[in-house]
Image (cartoon, helix red, strand yellow):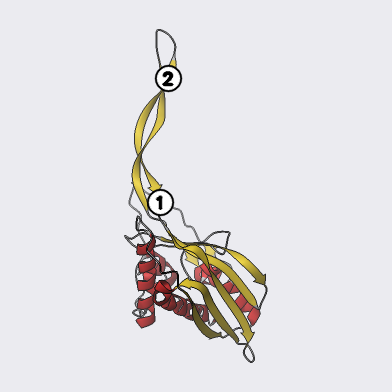
């Protein structure tokens, strides 16, 4: 049994587990004895009964992510005109600048799945399609007012390949010579891909207090190749809406590009 899993990930409360063990007469396959909660259903791939269907912004953001993944997984990078533009998105978050900062300082927590110790990097996992990896670095870090980081996209697709490895030692009974016996095993290997765009783009996020307990969040994605503007725009609009939902503690129904 597990409880408080959703609150642990989003509100930093205590996650609790209850383990029961009893003897049996014979082996048996694992079984789910009680219905899984909503949090578990999201991450198991089962849709909760009350989960709404993706709306137009969800669908546009999912299409944008899949298009980016398809572009960077091509053998050759796409041809770009060299023209750059700025994509802007904005929301009024129902939280103080400090609470908003705690979310945007870790963008992988509200933008996509996956992440690591570097908050400028995260992975987006797509079913049966190449993954999308966002790589970047923070370039400005002013608490509660302004955050900026560089971003580029790369493919995380992989392919199986044969790898030679020793798996036993053979000893000659006459000479006593020991030599490794080599076998070939299948192993996943990352596929080389282009980085899109070749030069990192810059994402600026400014926070402005908007009355009591509210914050205006302004996002500018600068130096973006013009060919990517229509693709990236719904991605950021949907991301800021998810930021708003998380700060208002609205139900989380998973990311549209993973459904």
Q: Mark 2 or mark 1: which is in front?
A: 1
Residue at 68%, 73% in the rendered image: 142
Residue 234, image x, y percentages: 42, 78
The residue wearing badge 2 is 179
Image height check: is 10 above or below 161? below
Q: CA distance from mark 2 to mark 1?
A: 35 Å
Secondary structure beneath label 2 = strand
Where the C terminus falls, by quadrant? bottom left
Secondary structure beneath label 1 = loop
Circles 2, 1 touching at the beta carbon (< 8 Å): no
| Number of marks | 2
Residue 124, image x, y percentages: 43, 64
The residue wearing badge 1 is 192
Q: Residues within 10 Å of mark 1 (few under 14, many from 20)?
A: some
Q: Could you tell whether 103 is left or right of 123 in the image?
A: right
Viewer-nearest residue: 163 or 194: 194
Residue at 50%, 82% in the rendered image: 89
Viewer-nearest residue: 131 or 259: 131
Residue 120, image x, y percentages: 55, 64
Residue 258 in sight in this render:
no
């Amino acid at each position: 049994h597990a409880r408080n899993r959703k609150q642990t990930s989003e509100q930093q409360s205590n996650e609790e587990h209850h383990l029961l063990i009893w003897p049996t007469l014979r082996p048996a396959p694992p079984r789910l004895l009680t219905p899984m909660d909503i949090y578990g259903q999201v991450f198991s791939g089962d849709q909760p009964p009350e989960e709404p269907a993706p709306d137009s912004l969800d669908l546009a953001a999912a299409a944008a992510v899949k298009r980016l993944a398809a572009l960077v997984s091509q053998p050759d990078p796409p041809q770009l005109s060299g023209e750059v533009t700025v994509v802007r998105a904005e929301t009024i978050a129902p939280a103080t600048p400090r609470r908003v900062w705690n979310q945007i300082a870790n963008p992988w927590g509200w933008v996509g799945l996956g992440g690591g110790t570097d908050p400028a990097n995260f992975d987006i996992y797509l079913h049966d399609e190449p993954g999308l990896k966002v790589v970047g670095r923070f370039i400005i870090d002013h608490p509660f007012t302004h955050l900026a980081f560089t971003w580029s996209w790369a493919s995380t697709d992989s392919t199986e390949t044969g790898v030679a490895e020793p798996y036993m030692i053979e000893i000659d009974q006459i000479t006593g010579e020991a030599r490794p016996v080599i076998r070939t095993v299948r192993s996943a290997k990352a596929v080389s891909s282009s980085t899109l765009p070749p030069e990192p783009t810059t994402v600026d996020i400014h926070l402005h207090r908007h009355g009591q307990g509210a914050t205006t969040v302004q996002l500018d994605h600068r130096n973006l190749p013009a060919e990517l503007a229509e693709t990236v725009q719904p991605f950021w609009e949907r991301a800021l809406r998810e930021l708003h939902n998380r700060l208002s503690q609205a139900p989380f129904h998973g990311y549209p590009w993973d459904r």
